[in-house]
Image: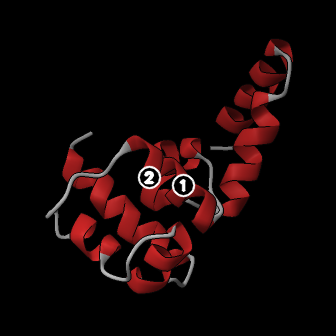
Amino acid sequence: MKYEDIINRIGYFRNKANLSARETSLRLGYNPQFMKTIENKSIELKVSTLLEFCDVVGISIYDFFFLGENFNAERKEFLDLFSSLSDSKKDAIINLMKNMK
């Protein structure tokens, strides 16, 4: 993943949360232009700011990197449920899905 991809995901999740760049900046505790400077790549994003951003928009860092633009609450729930299954149950679900094609 490139830095530009990360910046694009920030814009995607910010918009998905119905937040303007200004509102996001203020919720992060920065000046109103802060997010614009990140999204315009005038300043580099710090990891700590990315983690705070995820809290502001209500996603986990896993959601940010793994799901990206394909973020969907139903898919996330499915992945969360699937990951909690035993290996044998995961295999059964995978076989069921293959048979449904």
Assess disc 1: are there few (<14), some (14-19) or many (≥20) residues with their C-alpha within 10 Å of its C-alpha: some
Residue 24 in the image, given as x and y percentages of width and height? 48, 76
| Residue at x 17%, y 70% (from the top left corner) | 40
**SS for dot 1:** helix
| Residue at x 75%, y 19% (from the top left corner) | 91
Assess disc 2: are there few (<14), some (14-19) or many (≥20) residues with their C-alpha within 10 Å of its C-alpha: few
Q: Which mark is residue 52?
A: 1
Question: The N terminus lies in which quarter of the figure?
Answer: top left
Residue at the extreme left of the image, as rendered:
42
Distance from disc 1 to disc 2, alpha carbons, whole Å, reads: 5 Å
Compared to residue 20, the image places residue 24 above or below, namely: above
| Residue at x 68%, y 51% (from the top left corner) | 76
Question: The C terminus lies in which quarter of the figure?
Answer: top right
Residue 8 in the image, given as x and y percentages of width and height? 30, 62
Residue 37 in the image, given as x and y percentages of width and height? 22, 70
**SS for dot 2:** helix
What is the three-letter code of the residue carrying label 1?
Answer: Glu
Residue 20 in the image, given as x and y percentages of width and height? 44, 86
Total tally of numbered discs in the picture: 2
| Residue at x 51%, y 69% (from the top left corner) | 29
Label 2, on which residue? 49
Compared to residue 10, the image places residue 17 above or below, namely: below
